[in-house]
Image (cartoon, rainbow, N blue to C red):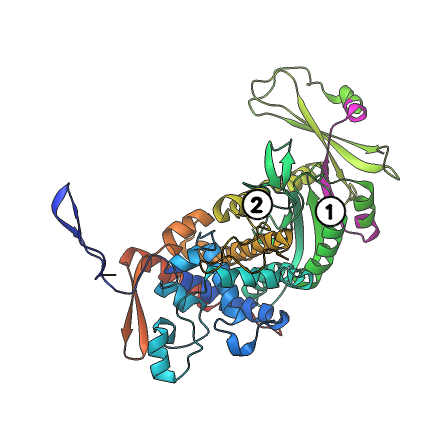
Amino acid sequence: MGETLARLSADFNGSLRIEPRPERLTSEAGAIVLREVLERVGIVDWVADRIPDPRDPALITHPLAELFRTAVLLFAQGWRDQDDADALRDDPAFRLAVSERKGISPLLSRAAEVRKNKNPAVPDGLASQPTLSRLYGVLARPENRLVLREAVLLTAARRQKAMRGGHRLRYATIDVDGLPIDVHGHQPGSAHNGHYRGRIYHPIVASIAETGDLLDIHLREGNVHGASGALEFITSLVDRVERELCQVASVRMDAGFPEEKLLAALEARSTPYVARVRNNAVLNEMAVPFLKRPVGRPPAEPRVWFHEMEYQAGSWSKQRRVVLVVLERPGELFLHHFWLITNWTREQIGNEELLNLYRERGAAEGNFGELKSVLDPALSSAPRPKSHYRGKAPKKRTTSVDSFAQNEVIILLHALAYNVMHVARVLMEKSTGRGWSLLRLRERVLRTAGRAILHGRRVVLVIGTASAKLWEGLWRELQGLRFQANG
């Protein structure tokens, strides 16, 4: 690079020169932190053991585990485009973070590695964009997407166990919602959604508000109803959550989800739930007698009233407990109201406790918002045939790519990247004693500049003092985090 690019000068300061040099510099040193997180939870080996590699072993340059790490770490560091792997192929932090090899080998060129170890089948930098595309094709098989979905949950469960001495949570509340993901094109399954006023995919996603972990995500077409596929998604997830993460799980949902089949299924398995119910003419009429303020001057603080009833919608098989929540809003003449439905009894959870529990959904919506805004999944896979290959017209113009399945792979890998970043976020919060957003974590900790120096048989990664102070506390917490497979 130093031979092909000239020095640059700045008009505002004649003494300033910008000089490119062929040194091992990086702005992505945080990839090393995330690799250490992956090692501590052991999720990469778990995935690699369950996904068969269909490639010819004699032609493999990048093992499946390396490709998997590359995809997750690129997304976590904010690189959304597969072509970014080509631009970063010589980045020393990424090369160290994704490689299976030890010592200084990940930073050696292929020619140097051949001279040293007589092994020509070694990667020369990160995997290329076509190689990552083939990885997505492998992961898009139905059985492999199930492995990825399980890996998202296991990453959360293993973090919890590692930080709780190997024990599961006693209780956990699963938050379920739809998450609109904008697309720019005509990807298969995407559609214009009038509610969100754009062309979207509409995946269903689950998390735990109280801990911040993502549990599962399932891609859906852009114009589906909010509760489409919720029955299978939620009932399967409850089983897996109670097997891996907690002893007793409950479900918390928005107004689009309470349908007879789902409610009956949760009741049959004695799974507690709370959800909001959309107002309708019958519910509005039931609420009218209670939409009155008490006589007298209102206090300075807005008030909340509760009225518990039994209600049976036309599509429901029986009456269910509903709670009318009436709210005062500052500066508004009329009272605001909405309804909650639950299968908890009044003795198990009172009305005010029920409202407080439901309001925890706000934290879950924040988790979903970070997945959407910070990770910013680019679901751009589309079945476009190649127009050229190595400068020539391809022999075949057909394609067997399942673009919808590949887009689900992409969003599942983003969910895994979220959970890996969340582990680092939780450890930073323990270390510093204050809250961290994923965006701040990326900007302050992960997007750290560094210089890799080869010193004998060791690699020294030099980072700035300001970043080192944050890394020191994080690394101290990270050393105590290790999942035991038999724990």
Amino acid beneath label 1: Ala
Q: Quadrant of the N terminus?
A: bottom left
Horizontal and vertical percent position of residue 424? 46, 58
Helix, strand or loop under label 2: helix
Q: Residues within 10 Å of mark 1 (few under 14, many from 20)?
A: many
**Could you say which is closer to the camera, residue 243 or residue 379?**
379
Helix, strand or loop under label 1: helix
Horizontal and vertical percent position of residue 376? 50, 46
Q: What is the magenta range? A: 266-284
From the image, tell me which residue sits under label 1.
230
- Residue furthest right in the image: 317
- Confirm whether residue 60 shows in the render: yes
Amino acid beneath label 2: Phe
Image check: 469 left or right of 295? left
**3D distance between C-alphas at marks 1 and 2:** 17 Å
In the image, which disc is placed on residue 56?
A: none
Instruction: Of the two numbered discs 1 and 2 on the same chain, state the one appearing first in sequence.
Output: 1
- Residue furthest left in the image: 15
From the image, tell me which residue sits under label 2.
368
Horizontal and vertical percent position of residue 104? 35, 75
